[in-house]
């Protein structure tokens, strides 16, 4: 009788286990991703990766594509407490983390560092996933700004390699600048970026040894000797040495168009996608395109924007999300993402694949990664400081430096006060 009762209990327990197992549903997560290059190609690739991931883990990933035109607004809403996915393809982690205040936006993943495998990435790229002592995900694309130059024009001027310092840039610029019989410039030695924003101002400041704010994001550092030296140097390139066009503040000026038209021999900070652009619009220039890291001064830095895969506050499936972004961080997956989405991966193994290294331009982009300086800054006011258009601190500063040629001391004092006021508001 006793054995029969025990048998009944055991069978009942086994039945509960079987029913529970049958009722188990593998996690399902929602993932947002920006659209890149060719959406149909991206959609096909991501469908394949999601299927492979589900086969490996049983986890289902539902993906939603976010158009870049609305991405900033959507991620700002997420960080402000709006509707959020479980995980996402994100950027501006410093800003959105501060904005979220530990309740919304990017979620720290410190206890998952081993699973994330951050030792697989260029050390410089980790600046975009680590903030205030916490880890927020894995980097996956580096929007680095190398130098581009025309080998034919440099050879014509007697140069067998690119400039490496500020002083070199002046010398090269003078020899490469070409004037007509009437004295008008037909070709400038150097094309500065047309963006009146962080991508144009910051690299010069970094190379002079400066930053625009303190490491804690509380103090503006614009009225400094380093900023003054950087702005004087750029102004001199235009007006003293006459090797760069003063038209860069004109909205119609596009540095890559000047380069393609033969009106500029060097672009010191250019998008990594320049070669692809030339292949589509000026294929005759591809054979004479070459690249190098941007020139240096006290430091040698290249502007770097970055995207990373992270997890959002509010998800109930953190473990599943970590598995997904770790999968996306694998070298083989990063290489496929790079190849299909026309991006450059910070994954060490993927970046050193022959796909990149057998191409001189690609090898240059990868080499420039060692000089990457994150464009992120530790203050929610950063986006306002860098806002494009009148009223933006850096926009107004750059316009005053280049277009109005106002006294630098006055320009920097005004910019310092405006930036500090914005930073004080968000403390």
Image (cartoon, rainbow, N blue to C red):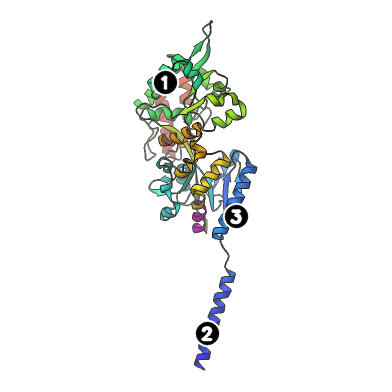
- Look at the numbered discs 3 and 2 and tell me whether their residues touch, using CB distance below 8 Å: no
Closer to us: 399 or 135:
135
Which residue matches tag 1? 169
Dot in front, 3 or 2: 3
Dot in front, 2 or 1: 1
Residue in the picture at 47% in, 18% down = 155
Which residue matches tag 3? 51
- Of all residues, the one furthest to the bottom in this rendering is 1
Secondary structure under the numbered disc 2 in the rendered image: helix
Give the vertical position of 132 relative to 412 (above or below). Answer: below
Magenta-drawn stretch contains 321: yes
Q: CA distance from mark 2 to mark 1?
A: 85 Å
State the mark number for residue 242. Answer: none
Which residue matches tag 2? 9
Lower position in the chain sequence, tag 2 or tag 1: 2
Which stretch appears magenta? 317-325
């Amino acid at each position: 009788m006793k054995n029969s009762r025990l048998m009944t209990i055991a069978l009942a327990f086994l039945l509960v286990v079987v029913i529970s197992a049958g009722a188990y549903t593998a996690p399902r997560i929602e993932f947002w991703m920006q659209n890149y290059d060719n959406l149909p190609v991206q959609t096909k690739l991501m469908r394949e990766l999601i299927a492979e991931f589900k086969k490996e883990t049983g986890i289902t990933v539902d993906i939603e594509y976010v158009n870049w035109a609305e991405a900033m607004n959507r991620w700002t809403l997420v960080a402000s407490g709006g509707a959020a996915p479980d995980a996402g393809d994100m950027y501006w982690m410093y800003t959105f983390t501060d904005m979220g205040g530990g309740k919304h936006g990017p979620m720290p993943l410190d206890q998952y560092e081993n699973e994330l495998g951050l030792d697989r990435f260029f050390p410089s790229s980790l600046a975009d996933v680590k903030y205030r002592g916490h880890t927020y995900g894995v980097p996956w694309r580096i929007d680095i700004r190398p130098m581009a130059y025309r080998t034919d024009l440099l050879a014509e001027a007697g140069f067998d390699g690119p400039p490496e310092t500020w002083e070199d840039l002046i010398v090269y610029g003078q020899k490469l600048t070409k004037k007509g019989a009437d004295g008008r410039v037909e070709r400038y030695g150097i094309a500065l970026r047309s963006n009146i924003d962080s991508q144009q101002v910051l690299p010069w400041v970094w190379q002079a040894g400066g930053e625009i704010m303190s490491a804690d994001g509380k103090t503006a550092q614009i009225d400094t000797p380093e900023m003054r030296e950087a702005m004087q140097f750029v102004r001199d390139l235009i007006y003293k040495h006459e090797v760069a066009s003063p038209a860069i503040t004109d909205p119609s000026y596009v540095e890559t168009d000047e380069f393609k038209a033969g009106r500029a021999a060097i672009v010191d900070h250019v998008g990594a996608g320049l070669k692809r652009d030339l292949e589509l619009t000026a294929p005759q220039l591809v054979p004479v395109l070459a690249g190098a890291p941007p020139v240096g001064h006290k430091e040698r830095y290249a502007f770097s924007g970055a995207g990373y895969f992270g997890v959002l506050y509010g998800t109930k499936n953190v473990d599943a999300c970590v598995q997904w972004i770790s999968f996306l961080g694998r070298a083989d997956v990063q290489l496929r993402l790079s190849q299909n989405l026309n991006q450059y991966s910070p994954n060490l193994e993927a970046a050193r694949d022959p796909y990149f290294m057998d191409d001189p331009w690609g090898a240059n982009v990868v080499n420039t990664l060692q000089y990457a300086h994150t464009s992120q800054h530790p203050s929610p006011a950063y986006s306002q400081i860098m806002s494009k258009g009148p009223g933006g601190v850096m926009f107004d500063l750059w316009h005053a430096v280049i277009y109005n040629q106002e006294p630098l001391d006055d320009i920097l004092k005004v910019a310092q006060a405006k930036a500090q006021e914005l930073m004080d508001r968000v403390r």
